[in-house]
Image (cartoon, rainbow, N blue to C red):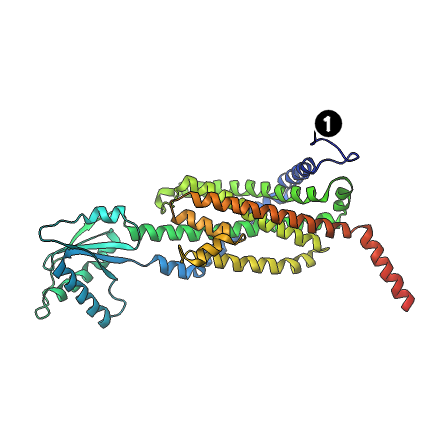
Amino acid sequence: MSNHAIRDGGRLSAWRAAWVIARRDFTAILFSRSFIFFLLGPLFPVVVMGLAGGVGAQVQSEASVADVGIAMQTQDVDAMLAAHSELAMQVPGSVPPMVALKRLAPGETFDARSVLEEGEGSLAAIVTGTLDAPVLTATEGRVARWQGTIGLIAAHAADQQTRIYPPVGTEIVGTSGAAENSGRLRTAQGGQVLLFLLIMLLASMVLSNLVEEKGNKIIEVLAAAIPMDAVFMGKLFAMLGVSVVGIAVWGSTGAAILYAGGQSLSDFANPGVGWPMFFVLFALYFAMGYLLLGSIFLAVGSLAATVREVQTLSMPATMFQILVFFFASLAVTDRGGVIEYTAMAFPLSSPFAMVARAAAEESLWPHLLALGWQALWVAIFIKGGASLFRRRVMQSGPRGAKKRSLFQRLGRATG
């Protein structure tokens, strides 16, 4: 027989045993009536998502930053900036931030449309032309919002006495660097929230499944025939498979609803890596995050004997994971900073931080490093969780019964 065949006195090898447990749990859950109710579970997180806008207030404030660039001759640029500073002091918050984009030489031209459509960052509009005839280039919504403001600034810059308000020419562009940056930040935040809800919703299934089998003494039967490490891995990967089926059903339903409503992915901001690669990375980071948290929950479940104990023991892990999620959300506003790199390095927050990076940045090589790093920690967590699982579950059998009977005899003797 091969190494994967039966050995050690009729016991299956660890990998073959893990496959048997995974197949057993997967089919038992997938073809049960309770799985239908499980698929209805996301209705409640969807409501939570709709009410959780305040969670990303800092992300939204970061996404709303939009600058107006000035590309005029040197004296006009200086005059516009001085007028802008004066109005900003007199009426705080009423004028958008302005920056000197380019000081043109006499006769030099500037293609504002190309700069906006091809650029990145917080640049949302560009003012060109002269003080007497300024031209505002921006998206349609920003033109409607800022056309009068630009005319007011140009009037202050042109003549401090007469205040003649010049007509402001407009040029509409489809998008801008600020709009693209804002959309990507919203995609990053939405990806993080969706990943968190899916992991928290689906990883908790391993707890109830384990407690049920401990109560029915099924774990003790499995322990007699199969290595406990294999039971741990089999249950963990079976629940991952069930989760993937659930996500496929929910994703297909959501896509059908969007399509029926006349919407498509083109209506949303394109992630940095593109939609196809973003979905692939999202699936990989979900698997990594699920295995990390699932191994913790499964180890916690091995410590509990009743559903009440499960709720008590799992609460600290759940609260800690919520703090990890908030930490990863904060990293979105610190792109390239210490917080972002720390969130990417910490194993429990790394999947959330890297999903946000996939939405905001175009490079793929950081994801290869992150997936390798997370896979290493998945192996560590599974090994540690399986070790604790083996010790605690085995203690719940005859050895635990002997200890209890010993304590009972001591109690009767002292009584």
Residue 285, position in %: x, y? 51, 46
Of residues 154 and 354, the one nearer the viewer is 354
Total number of numbered discs in the rendering: 1
Residue drawn 67% across the image and 53% down it: 301
Residue 144 at what x, y percent from top left? 22, 56
Q: Is residue 117 left or right of residue 201?
A: left
* Tag 1: amino acid: Met
SS category of the residue bearing label 1: loop
Judge from the rendering whether residue 310 lies leftward or rightward of residue 92; answer left or right: right
Residue 22 against residue 51 in the figure, above or below: above
Q: Which of 370 and 239 is in front in this view?
A: 370
Residue 274 in the image: state x and y as whole percent. Answer: 39, 42
Q: Position of residue 177 (x, y in %)?
A: 29, 51
Q: Residue at x 62, y 41 (%)?
A: 238
The residue where tag 1 is placed is 1
Q: In which quarter of the image is the C terminus?
A: bottom right
